[in-house]
Image (cartoon, rainbow, N blue to C red):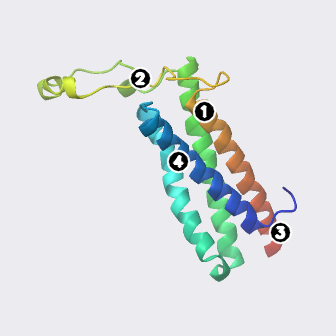
Amino acid sequence: MNNLSVKNLTVIGFGLSTLTILSVYFFQYVMNYQPCELCYAQRNPYYIAIPILLLALIFWKKLSKIMITTLVSAMLIIFLWSTYQAGYHAGVEWGFWPGPDTCTGIGGGISLDQLSDIDGSRVVPCDRASVRFFGLSFAGMNAIVSLVIAAIFALATKKSVQKIA
């Protein structure tokens, strides 16, 4: 991986990000695994990164070295944030710390309007993994994937900074 260019590393990061979010949709809409509130929050870094990376790759030749360095550095930060979110969620699932009241079944009172609509809604608890593969929940897998993508952008950042210097 050390011989790859900044652009090639960016393509790999974009590809892994896109594959990850497509996998999420596959499990939700085809395999019918319903996400919880924390699962939805873990998608946000991908929703931010994928369009930015796509535009950057389309206009790559027009970007200055400083812009490329800023881009890959921002992606590093985004995927470190993603790793944190996924790790937090995995910790909630393992019972290392409590999750938010809104998705663990513990919370404040309920209004009459909410009570009348209770049949139409289903709360998916954040503290129980819907499935585990090799002992890892979707949140645990996302923590690993996000960390790998962050490492790719860390290497891209290092290479990009070296090009400027």
What amino acid does circle 4 point to?
Leu
Q: Relative to 81, is 154 above or below?
A: below
Do tag 3 and tag 2 residues touch (Cβ < 8 Å)? no
Q: Nearer the viewer, mark 4 or mark 1?
A: 4
Q: Which element carries disc 1, helix, strand or loop? A: helix
Q: Which element carries disc 3, helix, strand or loop? A: helix
CA distance for labels 3 and 2 = 46 Å
What amino acid does circle 3 point to?
Gln
- Read off the residue under disc 2: 125
Residue 7's label in the rendered image is none
Q: Nearer the viewer, mark 2 or mark 1?
A: 2
Q: Position of residue 153 (x, y in %)?
A: 71, 56
Q: Nearer the viewer, mark 4 or mark 3?
A: 4
Q: Which element carries disc 2, helix, strand or loop? A: loop
Residue 87's label in the rendered image is 1
Q: Sequence-wise, which precedes: disc 1 or disc 3?
A: 1
CA distance for labels 4 and 1 = 20 Å
Q: Sequence-wise, which precedes: disc 4 or disc 2?
A: 4
CA distance for labels 4 and 3 = 33 Å
Classed neighbour count for the residue bearing mark 3: other residues with Cα under 10 Å, few (<14), some (14–19), many (≥20) = few
Q: Position of residue 65 (x, y in %)?
A: 71, 76
Q: Position of residue 44 (x, y in %)?
A: 48, 48
Do tag 1 and tag 3 residues touch (Cβ < 8 Å)? no
